[in-house]
Image (spheres, rainbow, N blue to C red):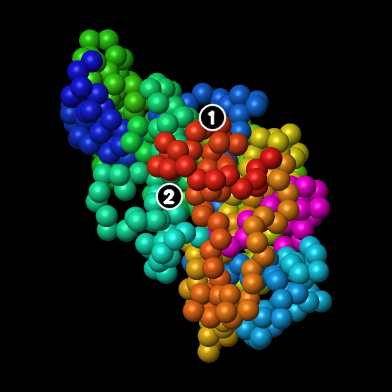
Amino acid sequence: MSQIKIAARREFLTQGLGVVGIAAGAAATVPNFLVKTALAGPQATSDQSVLVVLQLSGGHDGLSAVVPYGDDGYGRNRQASRIQADEVLKIDNYLGLHPNLTSFKDLLDAGCFAAVQAVGYPNPNLSHFTSMDIWHLADNEARSNSTAKENRFGWIGKYCDVAYKNDPNPQVAISLGSGQSPRALNGLEHPGISFSQPQSFRYLGDRGNQERAEAYAKLNQMTPKGLSSDQDFVTQTALNANAASASIRELAGNYKTDVSYPTGSLAASLKTVASLIAGGLNTRVYYVFQGGFDTHFFQRARHDSLMAELGGAVGAFQQDLAAQGNTERVLTMAFSEFGRRVTENGSQGTDHGIAGPMFLVGPGVKAGIHGEAPDLAQDKMVAGRDLQHKIDFRSVYAEVLEKWLGCPSEPVLGAKFPLIGCVA
């Protein structure tokens, strides 16, 4: 096949199918998300590892989750948002977990929870959008308005491209709970797919348009016989996409579990992930979201609620995986775009900060607290108010890529980052 045709097919997969006049004789538009489902692949093998990435959007206050209650500086800097020593789920005589993270403490005691402290990157940026781009693209020079070719693809998309290069039936990443795909999933050969709810994961282009409905039906009735190679490619991709989207809806819609999930969008997304894992979907990375962490005002009550939602959803998800017999296959990794200042503001909240913890959940972790405990002495903080970052987030990515997903990290991250021992 010519390089021009290869490039055309790649553009088709990454940009979506436009007017299918050559195949159906009318303007039957198959949307981008539906075309990408053709990449879903066959059923997973029983030993295939799965990564669930949990984005804590808004800038999570790590000091209110992994609490340095034994540091005098914590009490000096935190009044309204402080977690009292008698509330903390104590890990040792210095650190403890938020009282609403009982599931995390249970997982820690069972050897299935790890926290990596003081994670960040050099020359931190406190813009939500820019910092999230940096985490998504694994590039601390990335900017949200960058159009440079090397900044177009996310670390998960690059992983798919590296791990499944030239794979005609690649395994992909799926994002749930947001209408837009995170930049982390954007890859050259194997872009991820994204949907808010399984029920919406279907072809909707014929709504209210009889001509397009008839054209799409005709497209699905066609056979490849007599078509050119490119026409065959277009037709087969649409057919595969339609079948894959139906399969995802069926797996999620028919899923039954005895585990009681709490209410909320995060729990709903994780339950859908559990259903797709149980159904054998051949997907290596799932991506889910929890928002609301931009706690500039009245932080304590809001953060308490967020921790209850996080702990309840992740705890139920782990119970569900255990009931399926899939616990050993799944690692969940949580991150936020930045931390928050040690010092409180005048609104009983905290402003954008530098470093924060990452969480890893599952039997595949090296359980415990990794990295140096934060030192809250004023002369040890950045500008007397911010935690210093001690571990580059790409070291955690490298650990997950190499030890969990079995992929070399340097081609994905663009450099070699030291491993820190948070994955067993």
Secondary structure at badge 2 equals loop
Identify the disc placed on residue 138. 2
Where is residue 104 shown, x and y percent of the image?
73, 57
Which residue sits at x=59%, y=81%? Answer: 378
**Left or right of 236, for residue 327:** right
Which residue type does callout 2 highlight? Ala
Where is residue 304 shown, x and y percent of the image?
66, 72
Pick whichever, 102 or 199, lies toward us. Answer: 102
Which residue sits at x=56%, y=61%? Answer: 390
Magenta range is 101-119
**Left or right of 244, for residue 318:** right
Pick whichever, 122 or 212, lies toward us. Answer: 122
- When the figure is inspected, residue 284 is found, relative to residue 155, above or below; the finding is above
Which residue type does callout 1 highlight? Asn
User: Residue 71's image quarter?
Assistant: bottom right
Can residue 153 be seen from the camera position used here? yes
Q: Earlier in the sequence, mark 2 or mark 1?
A: 2
Pick whichever, 374 or 22, lies toward us. Answer: 374
Pick whichever, 172 or 145, lies toward us. Answer: 145
**Left or right of 110, for residue 140:** left
Q: Which residue of the protein is positioned furthest toward the front in this rendering? A: 379
